[in-house]
Amino acid sequence: MPRDFSPQHRPAPADRLAQATALLKQAAAWLKARAACWNSTTVITIASSAVVLLLLLIIGSRVPVAAYAPQTKHEVLEVSLPDSLDRHHHRPRSRSTTIRSGDSASTALRRLGFSSRDVLAMAAAAKAHYPLTRVHPGQRLVRSSDGATTTVTLDLDPLRFLQLVRKGDGGWHSTIQQRATTSRWVTASGTIHNNFFFDASRAGLDDRTIVNLAYIFGWDIDFARNLRDGDHFSVLLDERFDSSGKPIGTTILAAEFTNRGKTFRAIRFTNRHGETTYYAPDGTSMRKNFLKAPVKFTRISSRFSLARKHPILGYTRAHRGVDYAAPIGTPVHAVGAGTIVYLGRRGGYGRYIKIRHNDHHHATVYGHLHGYARGLHRGSRVKQGQIIGYVGMSGLATGPHLHFEFHVDGRAINPLHVKRTPSEPISRALRAKFNRRAKALLTALRQGTAPKVVAWQ
Ligand SMILES: [Zn+2]
């Protein structure tokens, strides 16, 4: 998590031009003063050098101009490292080896020039943090010495390494160290014209981020059935890299989604229970007692493409439910926590599941299933989002789809009209902190078209 993102100023291109002009003016004045003592060849040489210098400075000032030009879909907010992490600083002498298949830690350490006695002492020192018997092929060991201090590091994962240090003739000491990472903030945005997955990919989002985005808004937006051409989204991402520049992961810091003219915003925040989750800017939780849809979007199933192949029925008194056209085998999720009160064949519904939710007023019904999730039966307790079955066309169905009903006190109602109760909001004690964070993140999200340099510590 970035703790500080105060802007650091890089000289703007205009400043650089001004600097160059000032330099040239000085040079001209200096030449004028000296011209009397020199012949014309010298003056021409110096003057042409000055022109070349000016050209170079102008070209130099053009390079950052390109970096500043807003890109249409994917904006980069650069992050600079503090000087202490600069990779060009002095490095001690080092040797390295990688654990090979069949290697023990001792074999690898001896390759780095350690004696059996050293290896035993190192294993004993490491034991509390990471027993050296756990090494596996691919892990890197680096030995470095700086004066009397010898250091050995062993990669544990992209973010952590084991460090063993010996000072002078003393013993070995081990610690687990966090690797220095860099991160940059990136914004991406897009408009839905084809299907969510396609348009989000085109906006530059990776598969996992797309799924996470749908998850964050899954209590407010029905991604499987209710997206509309022209719906719009934007995301602020924290992209993390290890010290070698390899990407480690991407986190959604803030996001905005406009669905059928209604805009939802989400801020990532760690609550008083230490859970990191998403909140609306007013501090209410994005999580609610019922998900908006029992089916997630799939790469193939888009509202637009499937609508052409299969009629999608909405809620009417005669139909009593909503149909989700989706390929056979698409997972069906419980929209809320509860108990299965019916699981089996039931007339035109085919394979059917009914869940009574924990408030005892709400129940949901899932019909035409291809099959049930393993281990479920009448009386099973299910969690929100748990897979309970798979889309099929059992019973009276003309094509593969899920028939979904929402009941309140025994009466079927339009699932779109169900009142959803949010989970615990931001606590009072954290409200001021949350407000500051929300403001900063939403500002960065909005300013996606004007990249700025942010400091990372
Ligand atoms: Zn139906």
Image (cartoon, rainbow, N blue to C red):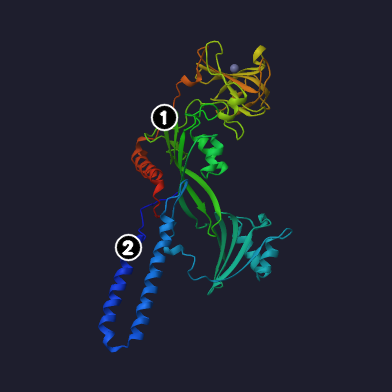
Q: Residue 2 versus residue 247: which sits nearer the camera?
A: 247
- Residue 457 visible in rendering: no
Q: Which of 330 and 22 is in front in this view?
A: 22
Q: How many residues crowd around disc 1 within 10 Å: few (fewer than 14), some, or many (20 or more)?
A: few
10 Å crowding of disc 2: few (<14), some (14-19), many (20+): few
- Work out which residue is located at the far front of the displayed protein and give it: 40
CA gap, disc 2 and disc 1:
43 Å
Give above or below for 8 relative to 214: below
When asked about the image quadrant of residue 40, the answer is bottom left
Residue 410 versus residue 13: which sits nearer the camera? 13
Q: Indicate left or right for 121 with 255 as reference.
A: right
Q: Do the residues labelled 2 and 1 touch (CB within 8 Å)?
A: no
Helix, strand, or loop for circle 2? helix
Q: Residue 13 carries which label?
A: none
Say which quarter of the image contains residue 33: bottom left
Q: Which of 36 and 281 is in front in this view?
A: 36
The answer to whether 414 is drawn above or below residue 12 in the figure is: above
> As drawn, which residue projects farthest toward the right?
102
Percent x, y of residue 414: 50, 17
Which quadrant would the C terminus be assigned to in this image? bottom left
> Which type of secondary structure does the marked residue at label 1 adopt?
strand
* Residue matched to label 2: 15
Quadrant where ligand 1 appears: top right
Q: Which residue is drawn at 36% across and 54% down?
A: 7
Residue 38 image offset from top left, x and y in percent: 31, 88
Sequence-wise, the earlier of marks 2 and 1 is 2
The location of residue 70, given as percent across then percent down, is: 42, 50
Residue holding disc 1: 262
Label 2 lies in ligand 1 vicinity (Cβ under 8 Å): no
